[in-house]
Amino acid sequence: MTKLRALLASLFLAATSLAHAQSHPIAGAHVMQLTREYLAAAPHRAIGTPGHAAAERFIATHFRPEAAKGDFLTDSFSARTPAGQMEMTNYIAKFPGKKDGIIVIASHYETNYPLQSIGFVGANDGASTTALLIALGEYYRAHPPQGYSVWLVFDDGEEAVGKEGMVPSDSLYGVRHLAAKWSGDGTLKKIKAFVVADMLAWKDMNIDREQNSTPWLLDLLDKAAKNTGHSSRVFKNEMAIEDDHIPFRQRGVPVLDVIAYEYGPYDQSRGDYAFHHTAEDTLDKLSVNSMQVSADLFVELVKLIDQH
């Protein structure tokens, strides 16, 4: 009888573990570990610095299997900035699917150029979503897309280089370059959705209903939240944000900005949230739980876009 109870207990634990694995295809704890490793390898990732080069190496190292198959691309370009001509690089990891069409998931990987003076590390703003995309890459390597192809884009130069902030001529360098390039070579018309991951790991994260996003994709994000049990973590706030999706929206591509812009208490003196673009954007502000929510939402969202 004791042996039978032990066997039943083992079977229950195995079933529970399997159900947990099925409900969470990517572990939030793993995304946190990748974030920690990325910050250790490249805490300061401003364009043109040794840290930026270290960030590039970190990303490339995690996609060696795709590189060996020709599915990890380096997209280097030169951009005119307030600090002069600068060399930038986007990285694209491709996971071929079975349907004709592409779902792009993008995150910027660099840190704000002017904030070098305060030792800005961008744990939430850039590092956490870079880690999320790496984890998504691992997932789609083991579970190749059954619908549209999934392309992961690590884009460069999202942040402003000058001190005037995010003005159209001084921001979104990588995605502006990529949108123009893909418009010219025919890739753009194959994109079914261009989805941005940004600032998705704060302990009190709540994803905004971003007004520059395509309505049907916002509806699918809402459905993904319901399907994964995360409805309380989305759409508490609504705002329009100039983010990496804008150059693609301007060219008629369906876009979705998955962003939780509210980061820390609101600071009236600076007119922004307390941890955003400050030295306070550090690893201790982040949580495994928020990373789990983000990972669950993206995996489910891809499935829903496939079915749309």
Image (tube, rainbow, N blue to C red):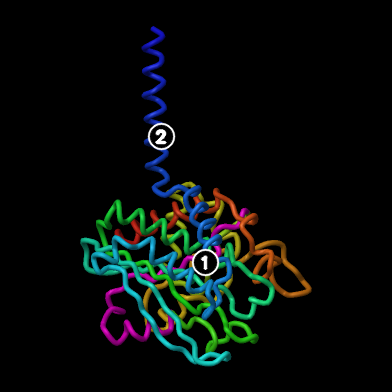
Q: What residue is rendered at 40% in x and 85% in y? A: 77
In this view, 47 is above or below 220:
below
40 left or right, relative to 276: left
Is 183 on the left or on the right of 219, as rendered? Answer: left
Across and down, in percent, residue 111 comes to 56, 73
For the magenta stretch, what is the residue range? 175-203
Please say whether residue 14 is visible from this viewpoint: yes
Residue 207 in the image: state x and y as whole percent: 55, 61
| Residue 215 visible here | no
Label 1 CA crowd tier, 10 Å (few <14, some 14–19, many 20+): many
Name which of mark 1 and mark 2 comes first in the sequence. 2
Q: Nearer the viewer, residue 61 or 231?
A: 61
The residue located at (64%, 76%) in the rendering is 116
Q: Residue at x 38, y 18 (%)?
A: 8
Q: Which mark is residue 214?
A: none
Residue 54 lies in the magenta stretch: no
Question: Which mark, by number, is residue 198?
Answer: 1
Residue under label 2, please give it.
Answer: 17
SS state under label 2: helix
The local crowd at label 2, few if under 14, some if 14 to 19, many if 20 or more residues have their Cα within 10 Å, is: few
Give the alpha-carbon distance from disc 1 to disc 2, as whole Å: 30 Å
Which residue is the extreme one toward the right?
A: 269
